[in-house]
Amino acid sequence: MNQAQLLQRCQAGDELAWEVLVRTHQGKVCAIAWHYLGDQDEALDLAQEVFVRVYRGLDACTEPDRFEHWLTRMVRNACIDQLRRRKARPPRQDVPADEMTSLSASSPDPEQQWLSTSRQKLVHRALQRLSDINREIIVLKDIQGLPLEEIAGMLELPLGTVKSRSSRARVELARAIVEIEGGPAGGGLGVGVAS
């Protein structure tokens, strides 16, 4: 069953189709939320909230081929709202990134495997040191693989700005990784972030 048929069945109230849709996209939704929020439990809670919003707004998704973009935008917006709430009401204490574990799911998927490797944990720790805009660009472009044009539209920035910020974000990420590893900062490190 393709994405259009799946969405059509979900819009018609097919519970099995809804379950398939959630299982198909839950790893991606949790991973995006985790990268934005840096907290596993908070990311899982937010993912549930996002799927409730998706369910209520299924009729608004009239272009099945744009569903993943629509879903990513919805997750991003929910994360930004959560970060705003967090700033208004700071947590009692921060949890060190070292204590983060990979998100658990009933069955392993590519996102889970990606999060479980030590290199990816290092990248995640480094991401937490970046400015908000640079972290967001790395997550959307390098981890989620969105094209720069979509990111520019999502962030409401000119394409040229997104391109230059993307380059700066990668440099900032490389420096953060070198600092975490205890090496000399600024040493021509070419960090590749694969999705």
Image (tube, rainbow, N blue to C red):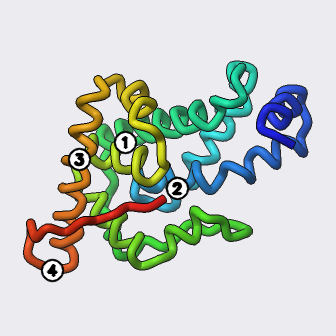
Q: How far across and how far down the image is residue 114, in percent?
A: 52, 68
Q: Are marks 4 and 1 in contact (CB under 8 Å)?
A: no
Classify residue 128 as left or right of residue 35.
left
Q: Report the amino acid beneath label 4.
A: Gly
Q: Are marks 3 and 4 in contact (CB under 8 Å)?
A: no
Q: Which mark identifies residue 167? A: 3
Which residue matches tag 1?
Answer: 83
Whichever of labels 2 and 3 marks the residue nearer the N terminus, that label is 2
Q: Relative to 157, is 92 above or below? A: below
Q: Secondary structure at mark 2?
A: helix
Q: Are marks 3 and 1 in contact (CB under 8 Å)?
A: no
Q: Quadrant of residue 186?
A: bottom left
Q: Nearer the viewer, mark 2 or mark 3?
A: 3
Q: Secondary structure at mark 1?
A: helix
Q: Are marks 1 and 2 in contact (CB under 8 Å)?
A: no
Whichever of labels 4 and 1 marks the residue nearer the N terminus, that label is 1
Q: Secondary structure at mark 4?
A: loop
Whichever of labels 2 and 4 marks the residue nearer the N terminus, that label is 2
Q: Report the amino acid beneath label 1.
A: Leu
Whichever of labels 3 and 1 marks the residue nearer the N terminus, that label is 1
- How far is disc 3 from disc 4 in space, using C-alphas? 23 Å
Which residue matches tag 2?
Answer: 31
- How far is disc 4 from disc 1 in space, using C-alphas? 29 Å
Whichever of labels 1 and 2 marks the residue nearer the N terminus, that label is 2
Q: Nearer the viewer, mark 3 or mark 4?
A: 3
Which residue matches tag 4?
Answer: 182
Q: Report the amino acid beneath label 3.
A: Ser
- How far is disc 3 from disc 1 in space, using C-alphas? 25 Å
Q: Report the amino acid beneath label 2.
A: Ala
Q: Which mark identifies residue 109? A: none
Q: How far across and how far down the image is residue 25, in percent?
A: 67, 49
